[in-house]
C-alpha cells in the first residue's frame, strides 16, 4: 500500500504576544492511499493547523511533511503552490465561496490563476455539481444556497482539478442529520475511487461513522491515539 501523506515530528509554534504557543506538537502519522480518516478534537486542539501543515498551506517550525514519499517542506513557494493546485483539494471551514458569484462561477474559481475555464473544464464542473446533487443550482448565487448546498459546492470546487488528496475542515459542521449523512456518503464514495481524504472535525457523526477508516484524537496539539499508524523515519 502506498503512503499518500506522512508527517514526521511535525511542530508548529506561534508567538502570541509575549508567549510562545505550540499549536502542533511533534505529530507523526501515516495515511495510506485510498483512506478516509478523521482528526477529532475540540476547538484549539491543533487539528486545523495540522491540516494546513499537511496541505502545505502553513510552514512548520520543525519536522517534515511528505506527499507520496516526497518532502514538501523545503519546496520554494511557487513549487508548493503548484503542488497544492495539482495534487491537493482543500475545503475550508468557512468554505470561502464568493457570495455574489454563482455556484458554477465559484466552482471554476481555481482555474482563474491559470487562464480560466475552457469548455472541458466547464463540463467537468457541471458534472461534479450534478454528482453532488446540485443540478439546477448552477446559476444560483452562493449567498442563496443552503448550508448543505454550500458545503457540497465547496467540495465540488476542491475536486475540479481531480486531486489525489482531499483535506476538509469541519465538513459536517452546522448541518442537520440528513445533510451530515449526505456529506459522509459523498466522502466515502470519493475514498472508494482511490482518493485519500482527511477531515478535521469535532462532530461524532463523522468521527464515529463506520465508513471512516481511522480516527485520531488531538488534544493540546498532540496526537493522543496510541494505535495511530506511524511513519518510518525518513532516510538521512
Image: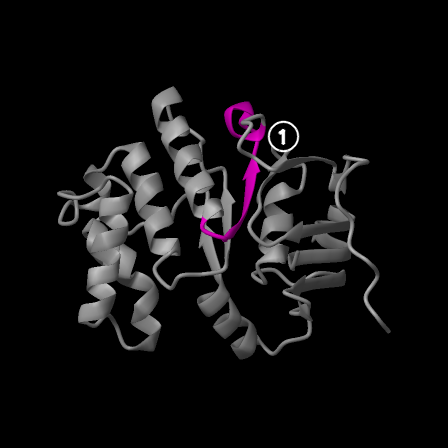
Considering only vertical position in the picture, is 212 above or below 155?
above
Q: How many marks?
A: 1
Q: Seen from this angle, which residue lies furthest right? A: 236
Judge by depth and name the residue closer to the eye, 200 or 20.
200
Please tell me whether mark 1 sits on a helix, a strand or a loop. loop
Residue range of the region highlighted in magenta in the rendering: 193-207
- The image quarter in which residue 73 lies: bottom right
Task: Tell me the residue that label 1 is attached to.
Answer: 42
Considering only vertical position in the picture, is 168 above or below 170?
below
Is 54 positioned to the left or the right of 129 in the image?
Answer: right
Residue 19 seen: no
Is 52 positioned to the left or the right of 7 in the image?
Answer: left
Is 193 positioned to the left or the right of 117 in the image?
Answer: right
The question of residue 236 being in magenta is answered with no
Judge by depth and name the residue closer to the eye, 117 or 62.
117
Judge by depth and name the residue closer to the eye, 174 or 189.
189
Quadrant of the snapshot with the N terminus: bottom right
Considering only vertical position in the picture, is 119 above or below 50?
below
- Mark 1 neighbour density, 10 Å: few (under 14) some (14–19) many (20 or more): some
Q: Residue at x 21, y 54 (%)?
A: 126
Q: Could you tell me residue 232's position as x and y percent?
A: 82, 58
Q: Residue at x 23, y 53 (%)?
A: 127
Residue 79 seen: yes
Quadrant of the snapshot with the C terminus: bottom right
Q: Residue at x 59, y 54 (%)?
A: 33
The question of residue 197 being in magenta is answered with yes
Is 204 positioned to the left or the right of 143 in the image?
Answer: right
Q: Could you tell me residue 121's position as x and y percent?
A: 25, 66
Considering only vertical position in the picture, is 206 above or below 177?
below
Amino acid at each position: 500500500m502506498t503512503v499518500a501523506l506522512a508527517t514526521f515530528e511535525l511542530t508548529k509554534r506561534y508567538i502570541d504576544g509575549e508567549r510562545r504557543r505550540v499549536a502542533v506538537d511533534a505529530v507523526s502519522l501515516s495515511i495510506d492511499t485510498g483512506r478516509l480518516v478523521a482528526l477529532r478534537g475540540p476547538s484549539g486542539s491543533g487539528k486545523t493547523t495540522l491540516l494546513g501543515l499537511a496541505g502545505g498551506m502553513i510552514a512548520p517550525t520543525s519536522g517534515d511533511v511528505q506527499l507520496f514519499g516526497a518532502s514538501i517542506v523545503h519546496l520554494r513557494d511557487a513549487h508548493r503552490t503548484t503542488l497544492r493546485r495539482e495534487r491537493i483539494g482543500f475545503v475550508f471551514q468557512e468554505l470561502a465561496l464568493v457570495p455574489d458569484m454563482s455556484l458554477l462561477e465559484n466552482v471554476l474559481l481555481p482555474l482563474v490563476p491559470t487562464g480560466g475555464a475552457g469548455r472541458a473544464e466547464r463540463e467537468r464542473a457541471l458534472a461534479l455539481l450534478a454528482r453532488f446533487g446540485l443540478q439546477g443550482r448552477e446559476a444560483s448565487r452562493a449567498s442563496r444556497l443552503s448550508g448543505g448546498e454550500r458545503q457540497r459546492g465547496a467540495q465540488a470546487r476542491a475536486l475540479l482539478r481531480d486531486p489525489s488528496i482531499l483535506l476538509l475542515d469541519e465538513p459536517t459542521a452546522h448541518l442537520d442529520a440528513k445533510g451530515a449523512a449526505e456529506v459522509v456518503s459523498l466522502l466515502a464514495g470519493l475514498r472508494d475511487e482511490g482518493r485519500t481524504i482527511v477531515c478535521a472535525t469535532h462532530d461524532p457523526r463523522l468521527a464515529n461513522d463506520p465508513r471512516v477508516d481511522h480516527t485520531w484524537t488531538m488534544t493540546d496539539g498532540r496526537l493522543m491515539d496510541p494505535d495511530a499508524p506511524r511513519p518510518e523515519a525518513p532516510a538521512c
